[in-house]
Every structure is written in C-alpha cells, then in structure tokens.
Image (spheres, coloured by chain):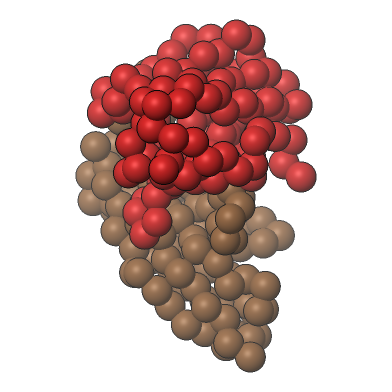
Chain colours: A red, B brown
Amino acid sequence: ETGVTQTPRHLVMGMTNKKSLKCEQHLGHNAMYWYKQSAKKPLELMFVYNFKEQTENNSVPSRFSPECPNSSHLFLHLHTLQPEDSALYLCASSQGNSGSPSSYEQYFGPGTRLTVT
Amino acid sequence: LAKTTQPISMDSYEGQEVNITCSHNNIATNDYITWYQQFPSQGPRFIIQGYKTKVTNEVASLFIPADRKSSTLSLPRVSLSDTAVYYCLVGDIISSGSARQLTFGSGTQLTVLP
C-alpha cells in the first residue's frame, strides 16, 4: 500500500466510448503524474500537475484529457481511443517542492489495465 | 534531454551482490538520479536517490562517479524476491517545469536464480 489508489484496476472499452480513470493520493503531496506503460516499452510520462499547474507532454494525443480538481485527486478522461492505447496507466504523486530532493521520490499507484477493443 | 541506457537483463544467484549500471551522458547540473523497482502488474517503487558520490540506505547503495555520467545500483545479497525490473531515472521535473525533463530508462530485468 503506497498511499496512492487508482480505480478502476481493469477497464475494457470500445473505441467510441468515453471513460475516466481516477487517482487519489492520501500522502499530502502537491504533485501528481500520469504515466503510460505499454508492453516492452519504457514508462512514458504523460502529464504532470505541480501545485495545480499542469505541465503537459506535447506528444500526448488530445483523446487523453487530464483533470486535477485538487491536490489529492487526478483524473484521466478518455474518448475515442485506439487499440494502440491499450496499456497500463499509472498514477504517481510526490511532494512537489521545487529544489527539494524529496520531491523526486514518486509514489505509484497499482495502475489501471486498459484494453481498447 | 538526459537519456539513460541500462542493460536489458541480468541474471544472478541468491546471496550474491548485484550491480546494475546506468549511463546518462547528457545529465544536467540540476538532475538527480533515482532508481525504482517494479514487479509485474504493479507500479514502480522508489529504491534510492542521489546526486553525487555514494548513497546508502537499508535496501541498496548508489555509486555516482565525479563526472555523473553514469551510476551504479548495488543490491547486496539478493534473494528470489528481488527479481524485478529496475529503472534508472534522471531528471528534474519540478524546477525545470517541463515533463520532457523526466526520462525513465528502458529498465533492467533482474532475475535471481536459486
């Protein structure tokens, strides 16, 4: 138990569906992250929120839309996905203080296994 | 962008010391080096972090030479439960303000044999 929870743990959706992934952290952190992990590929950082400011990876398709309503919750809204978007989506959080070494220790959730059919 | 290079896989036997080296030739002045462990179907777990020289905790040691272009994770006396993927991470997300500065390596699959 890392203090970061993700729901659902598994999700199967069609290409025309709209769904959302939810992440919640109970660690009092101020930075939250979405990662994508495809089979046999490195972890790919998708989005970062630091003190509610979003830093976006420009290579992320617009069919992925993040939302961070507060420092404890992070959502990833999904719409019109493609089969190649099937992957493990991981959420993480960290302290988020600029210049602090402890800010780099990220706590990961268990992930959501997404299958797009 | 500080890319990292790690061996794809390593095998070891129980009770041995394992050293995994990561190359990061383009590491920036503000970058820290962090290592994570990941088991199948789980999120990565923080192991150790350092900036220079040597860092040791209850789980591992991290050796960083003066030029910081590489780092070596040392796992003492590994057991079967240490079988996992180990990632080397170099970056400085927060002060750089850019997600592009965070780079996970391809990871090293460590297999500990009985």
Instruction: Give the residue drawn at x 57%, y 34%.
Output: A92
From the viewer's side, name the closer residue of A57 and B45.
Answer: A57
Q: Which quadrant is the N terminus of chain A positioned in?
A: top right
Residue A112, how many percent across, how many down? Answer: 57, 41
Indicate the position of residue B79 as horizontal and vertical percent values: 67, 78
Between residue B66 and residue B57, name the one nearer to us: B57
How many tags in the picture?
0
Residue B29 at least partly seen: no
Of B46 and B72, nearer the camera is B46
Locate the C terminus of chain A by quadrant.
top left
User: In this rendering, would A57 be left or right of A26?
Assistant: left
Residue at (65%, 85%) from the top-left corner? B15
Q: Which residue of the protein is positioned furthest toward the bottom in this rendering? A: B114
Compared with B105, A46 (above or below) is above
Can you give x and y, in whole percent of width and height, for residue A27 in the image?
73, 27
Across and down, in percent, residue A48 comes to: 45, 23
Foreground: A62 or B113? A62
Q: Residue at x 58, y 20 (%)?
A: A74
Asked whether residue B36 is in view, the answer is yes
Decide: is A89 above or below A26: below
Left or right for B79, reference B64:
right
**Where, by quadrant of the figure, is residue A62 drawn?**
top left
Q: Residue at x 58, y 48 (%)?
A: B43
